[in-house]
Amino acid sequence: MVEVKDMKKDLTEGHYGILEPKAHLPAASSDTGYPEIDAWIVPGVAFTSDGLRIGMGKCIYDRLMEHSKAAKIGVAYEFQRTDYIPTEAWDIPLTRVLFA
């Protein structure tokens, strides 16, 4: 995690043309639960309408969002919607899921 202050100066084109932070940016600290973050945009493989998700199985987003009070938003295609997803104690539910 790094803090991006200027989209033009701090990002560079990476794989598949996706913008990503430049290597020189200092790491952000998770000690305070990232209080400056207003919203998380969270990827996933499958989502329920009530905010449960299946990611890639490494719990990276769950650990990042664990202490954050920011909105947690999943963005998905309609084919990624499902009625049931099994959950574990460490799974962080999303505030909202937007289906396209």
Image (tube, rainbow, N blue to C red):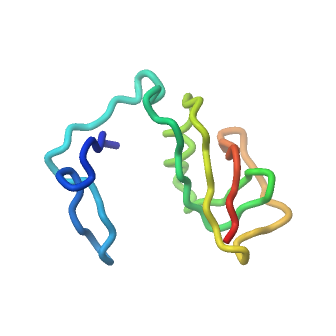
The residue at 55%/49% (across/down) is 59
**Location of residue 84 by image quarter:** bottom right
User: In the rendering, at what x and y percent does residue 35 appear?
Assistant: 47, 26
**Considering the image in quadrants, where does the C terminus appear?**
bottom right
Q: Position of residue 60 (x, y in %)?
A: 49, 48
Q: Is residue 54 above or below residue 17?
A: above
Residue at far top of view: 32
Tell which residue pokes out farthest to the left in this image.
24
In the image, 95: left or right of 14?
Answer: right
Q: Indicate left or right for 90 with 28 as reference.
A: right
Q: Which of the two residues, 99 or 59, is positioned nearer the viewer here?
A: 99
Q: Give residue 97's position: percent from left, percent from top.
A: 69, 56
Residue 72, quarter of the rendered image: top right
Residue at screen point 26% across, 37% down: 27
User: In the image, what residue occupies the spot 29% across and 44% down?
Assistant: 4
Picture coordinates of residue 7 (x, y %)?
Answer: 27, 52
| Numbered-mark total | 0
Above or below, 95 against 7 in this view is above
Q: Residue at x 72, y 74 (%)?
A: 78
